[in-house]
Amino acid sequence: MSRIIKISLFEPSDIIRTGMLSMLNRINSFRMEAHEIDDAVKLKSSLLLNTPDILIVNPCLLCVLPLTQIRKATGNQAMKCIALQSSFFAPVSLKVFDGVISIYDSIEQITEKLTYLATDADIENLRETLTAREKEVVVHVIQGLTNRQIAERMNLSMHTIISHRRNICSKLQIHSTAGLTIYAMTNKLVDF
């Protein structure tokens, strides 16, 4: 994962927020940028300014402003939301979140949860960056066609096909046909 994952932490407790930020700073499995929000009044403006990929939030604060409203108000529908659980919550009330981090979780557990959501967010963003032509080239590549055959089918020059393939590899960080096949299947570019 090459891009920086933006994380916002919304927690009014200085002790919990500082401890969580300390844990986040110890994670080195991916690059991240963490922002803290300590007041509900600052929430919307901070989310608009920082456009986080992941919002970690104390679930009891959502009585004031539900997740759907937060996503709608900030225009960030793809933002993943994680509950920062510092007290007991009924499991049913936590189902609206994409994940749950407990204050009792180890650094390894937190890293695993964030890596999963960060990877998911990264894949989502990458899917949006492929152009329609690049997606078409991916499909032809996994069908086993050569650059020349792809160029003929798409009525493009071989140079253009090579450029598309270079861009695809750069955007996805996938350099094998097997990897592109998995990507195409996961993102429903092809049916097998």
Image (spheres, rainbow, N blue to C red):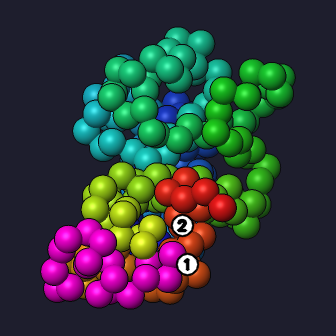
Residue position marked by numbered label 2 in the rendering: 183
Q: Is residue 111 above or below residue 128?
A: below
Disc 2 residue type (three-letter): Tyr
Name the side, left or right, on which 159 lies relative to 40.
left
Q: Which residues are magenta?
A: 141-159
Please say whether residue 156 is visible from this viewpoint: yes
Q: Secondary structure at mark 2?
A: helix
Crowding around mark 1 (Cα neighbors within 10 Å: few <14, some 14 to 19, many 20+) is some
Along the line of sight, which residue is nearer the eye, 91 or 142? 142
Residue 19 point in image, percent of width and height: 60, 52
Residue 145 covered by magenta stretch = yes
Which residue is pictured at 26% across the width and 69% down the height? Answer: 154
Q: Which residue is mark 1?
A: 179
Above or below, comparing residue 142 to residue 123 in the picture: below
Res. 166 in view: no
Callout 2–callout 1 Cβ contact below 8 Å? yes
Residue at 59%, 62% in the rendered image: 185
Distance Cα–Cα, label 2 vs label 1: 6 Å
Question: Callout 1: helix, strand or loop?
Answer: helix
Name the amino acid type tagged 1: Gly
In percent of width and height, residue 2 lies at 40, 73
